[in-house]
Amino acid sequence: MSTRLYVGNLPESVTAERLRGLFAEHGEVSAVKIVTDRYSDEPRGFAFVTMEAESAANVAIANLNASDLDGRALRVNHAPQRERENGHGQPIVGKEGVRIAMQFRERANMTYELDCAGLSVTLRMFPTADEKQWRVEALPTKAADGIVVAAVAPTRGEALVEVASQWCAYNAVNELPLVDWKAVVTALKSVRAV
C-alpha cells in the first residue's frame, strides 16, 4: 500500500529529481510533488513524496527526518489523512464512490485531494490573474510526473467540464487513468466547490 509523506523545510534549490533520488535510497518512490505558489510558481518550501510501501516510508522517515539537506534540517512525516465531513461526522463521498480525502484553502484558491475509487487525483481551482475567470487543474498522482490537465473558463463548473473533456481526450493517447467525472462533480457539489 502506497504511503504519502510530507517533506518540509526544503531549500529553494531542491528539484523533484533530487528528492526522488534521496527517498529512493529507502524504497520505491511512485510520485514527487514540490508545492509551488500559484501566482509566482516559486517553491513554497515543502513537497509530498509517495512511496510504494508503507515500510519503506517508515524507514525514510526514520532516516531523513531532521537530516541535513543544503544546510536545512528536513521535516519528514506522514502526510495528514484528514477527511472532510458533512457536519454529521460522515465522510463526504460522491454517490458513485468519489471521496474528498483532503481539502486545502488559501484565499480564493482551493486544492482537493480526491479518492476516485482507489485513484488519487489532485484538483486545484483558482482565479486567473485578472480575476475574471477560473483555472482548474487536475493532476493524477500515479501518472508520469508533470502531467497536468487544465482549463480556464468564466466559472469553476465550466472549467471543470473542460478539464474532464481534455482528460478523456488525453487518456485516449497517453493512457491517463479513467475517472468518473460525473462522480467528481457530485462530490464537489457536496462542498459547494462548483
Image: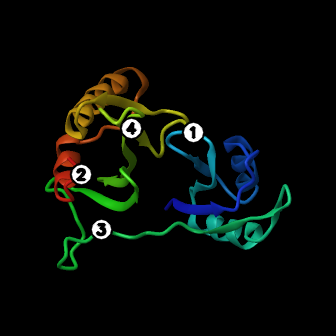
The amino acid pointed to by label 2 is Ala
> Label 3 near label 1: C-beta < 8 Å?
no
| Tag nearer the camera, 2 or 1 | 1
Which quadrant would residue 98 be assigned to in this image?
A: bottom left
- Helix, strand or loop at label 3? It is loop
Q: Which residue lies furthest to the right in this view?
A: 71
Label 2 and label 4: CA atoms lie apart by 14 Å
Q: Which of marks 4 and 3 is nearer the N terminus?
A: 3
- Front in this rendered view, residue 128 or 3: 128
Label 3: how many Cα within 10 Å (few below 14, some 14–19, many 20+): some
Q: How far apart are marks 4 and 3 (CA)?
A: 20 Å
Looking at numbered disc 3 in the image, what kind of residue is underneath it? Arg
Residue holding disc 2: 193
> Which residue is the site of mark 1?
40
Give the image's coloring scheme: rainbow
Separation (CA) of disc 1 from disc 3: 29 Å
CA separation, marks 1 and 4?
A: 16 Å
